[in-house]
Image: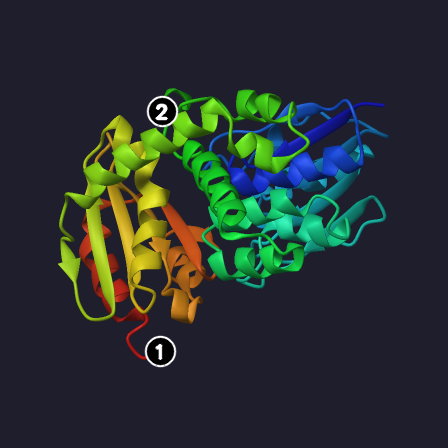
Amino acid sequence: MAAYDVCNGDADGLFALRQLRLAEPLSATLITGLKREIALLQRVPAAAGDQVTVLDLSLARNREALERLLAAGAYLRWYDHHEPGAIPSHPNLQVHIDTDPRVCTSMLVDRALAGRFRPWAIAAAYGDNLTESAQALADTLGLDAAQRAALQRLGEAVNYNAYGEDPTDAVIAPAALFKWLTQFDDAFAAAQAPLIAHLEATRQADLAAAEALPPQHANAHSAVYVLPDAPWSRRVLGSFANRLAQRAPDRAHAVLRVRPDGTYLVSVRAPLAAARGADTLARAFGGGGRPAAAGIDRLPQARLPQFVARFASWWATD
């Protein structure tokens, strides 16, 4: 029997897996990637009796591969917080999916494990821009301000590392980062490591470059930023969108990056005060995601004016 761990390479996916493997040690083949590498299940060659654990990946975007693995006789356990579409009913499939915009995958694992490794879930929530949820979990442990800041730094730095167009954009490949994380049972110890300090320093430098650019379209309800195609912009896209959302919680934000083929990569953040609708808007342009945060992989230049117009009015009545 073979085992496979399949997860998003951001803080939420990696920290969800870290919690599970602390609770259930297992030698498994890891399949992960950058944040936008969502269709990872197609890389799994599982056969009858094999075990597959999936974390922080959209079931809707992996449905065909899921059905193939179930038909082959594999057993799958799935933790996620993205909209799944219709969930197959199968004796070999165990699903833990909650699309509440206040939860992330690591929080679902924390829930299943009764909080045994909660600091990892807190760090993941910070990394997923779920600051209120992270603070609420931190309250349950009585964490002080310094401890909260350490977990926030860990979550944001690891989450930042997962953005990029190409594996060379990342400071460290997500699979290598998870291997590095396995030396730490304690999230606080990981937060103090030199690698996290390096990731955070790079993140801050990239954010400074992004913040030097003014929005190209803005009104009282929304702002749209367009970044050039560069290694720093490929890394910073999501972190910049999160920072904008935190600074102006009543405003929606879209951060676009010009791709080499002339299309745009888009990261959408609903207003934190009205964390809904981002996924619906993104799907109208071929993207997807969660109600609070979504993305579009390739927005054609010809559709940019349409996107900007719809985005500008999408939350205007909230």
Can residue 246 be seen?
A: yes
296 with respect to 158 (left or right): left
Which amino acid, by three-letter code, is at mark 1? Asp
For the point 38% across and 33% down, the residue is 200
User: What amino acid is labelled 2 in the image?
Assistant: Asp
Give the colour scheme of this rendering: rainbow
Say which quadrant the N terminus sits in: top right
Lower position in the chain sequence, tag 2 or tag 1 = 2
> How far across and how far down the image is residue 253, in percent?
29, 58
At mark 1, the secondary structure is: loop
How far across and how far down the image is residue 147, in percent?
A: 54, 46
| Residue 88 visible in the picture | no
Q: Nearer the viewer, residue 105 or 265?
A: 105
CA neighbours of label 1 inside 10 A, class few (<14), some (14 to 19), many (20+): few
Q: Residue furthest bottom?
A: 317
In this rendered view, identify the residue nearer to me: 268 or 285.
268
- Give the image location of residue 300, x and y in percent: 25, 45
Indicate the quadrant containing the C terminus: top left, top right, bottom left or bottom right.
bottom left
Q: What residue would you read off at disc 1? A: 318
Q: Is residue 236 above or below residue 87?
A: above
Q: Are marks 2 and 1 in contact (CB under 8 Å)?
A: no
Residue 205 placement (x, y as % from top left): 26, 33
Measured in 3D between alpha carbons, the distance from the residue under mark 2 to the one under mark 1, in whole angstroms, is: 37 Å
In the rendered image, the vertical position of residue 285 relative to residue 50, given as above or below: below
The structure residue drawn at horizontal position 57% and vertical position 29%, both measured from the top left corner, is 32
Question: Left or right of 94: which side holds 201?
Answer: left
Residue at (85, 48) in percent of width and height? 91
Q: Which mark is residue 169?
A: 2
Residue depicted at 27% across the width and 49% down the height? 255
